[in-house]
Image (cartoon, rainbow, N blue to C red):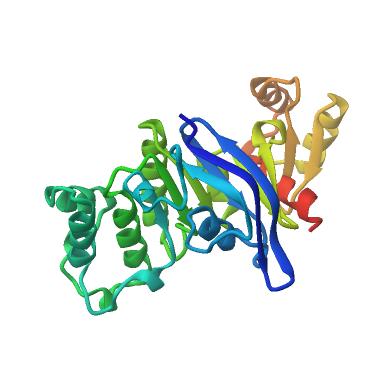
Amino acid sequence: MTILSINNLSMSYKKQKVLDNINLTINSPGIWALVGPNGTGKTTFLNTVTNLIPATSGKVTLVGKPNTDTSVFKEVAFLQDNTVLFDYLNGYDHLKYICEVQKINKNRIQEVAKYVGMEKYLKKTVGNYSLGMKQHLLLAMTIINKPKLLLLDEPLNGLDPTSAILMRKILLELADQGTTIILSSHNLSEIDRVTKQILFLKDGQIIEEDMNQHETTYYHFIVSDLVRAVKLLTAENYQIGQTEHGFKVVLGSHLLQHLFDLLKKEKIDILDVQKEIVGSEKRYEEIFEV
C-alpha cells in the first residue's frame, strides 16, 4: 500500500503560490526530513497534506485514502505546534479525549506517557508545562493511536539535550516498527542523526535527496606538532584543512590506522580526535545558496 501519494499539489495565498505542482510518493516505512528556511512553506505543506488547509489544486492520499476522508486520522497523526493545547486541561485530559474520539483503550494513556517520559507531570495542568514538557505531550498525542504515517512540525523545538536524545530514540524505534515519518526541522545536525532522506522545499517545489550521495566524513585532530603533521600528511596525499586548534582530514582511500601509524612513527602525539559527518548542512548551503 502507498503510504503517501501527492499529485500536482498546489497551494496559493491570494496571488502568492506557496506550493507549486508538487509530486511525491512514499511507499515504505522510514524517516524523511522536510527542510527549508523560514517562510518557504513547510508548515503550509504539512497542513495541506492533512487537509487542514484545502489545496488550491491537486490530490493527496494518505494510507490509501483521500486526505479529505477524516477517517484517515485513525492511522495518521500530525504533531502541530503547542497552540493546539488547552492550558486549563492536564496532559491526561488531552490523551483521554483522543482515546474517546478514536475508541482507543484508556490503558494506552499510561503506556504512552511512560514511553515519552511524562509520567510525573501527566496530571499537571498544561498551563504550568515548560516548552519541552509540551513537546512531550504533543508527541504522546500523536503516537497514542499507533499511526502508520506520522507528520511532525518542528518536534525538536524547545528540547533540552536529554529530551532531544529521547525524541531521536523514539523516532528511530517507530520507523523500525513500520511507521513512516515526515518531520520538519531546522536542526540539521539532528536530522543527520535520524535520516539520510531529505525533502528540501524551495520555491514551492520538493527536491528529494539521499544524503548518502552527499556526505563527507572529516576527522578533526589536535596534535603535539601541527606544522610537521600537516607537512607529513600532505606529502602522503591526504586532504588536509587547518582548523582553529589543529587540522581536519578526509581519509579518501586511506585507512585511519595508517594515519595513526604515520604520526606515531614521527613521534607526533595525538592529543584529541573527533569524527564529523557533513551531509545535510553542506547540501542545504548548495541548494539555498547560503
Q: Is residue 289 left or right of residue 259?
A: right
* Residue 26 percent coordinates (x, y): 55, 35
* Residue 288 percent coordinates (x, y): 77, 55
Look at the picture and state if 160 lies above or below 196. Answer: below
Look at the picture and state if 171 lies above or below 93. Answer: above
Of 164 and 210, which appears nearest the observer?
Answer: 210
Task: Tell me if residue 274 can be seen.
Answer: no
Q: Is residue 136 left or right of residue 280?
A: left
On-image quarter of the N terminus: top left
Q: Which residue corresponds to the image point at 48% horizontal and 54% vertical from the top-left?
A: 50
Q: Which residue corresponds to the image point at 54% horizontal and 42% vertical from the top-left?
A: 32
Q: Is residue 270 left or right of residue 122?
A: right
Look at the picture and state if 282 lies above or below 83. Answer: above
On-image quarter of the C terminus: bottom right
Of 222 and 83, which appears nearest the observer?
Answer: 83
Of 83 and 103, which appears nearest the observer?
Answer: 103
Label total for image: 0
Q: Is residue 187 left or right of residue 120?
A: right
Residue that extends furthest to the right in the rendered view of this protein:
235
Task: Tell me if residue 96 can be seen.
Answer: yes
Look at the picture and state if 262 lies above or below 248. Answer: above
Q: Quadrant of residue 158?
A: bottom left
Q: Quadrant of residue 271?
A: top right
* Residue 124 percent coordinates (x, y): 18, 71
* Residue 243 percent coordinates (x, y): 75, 49
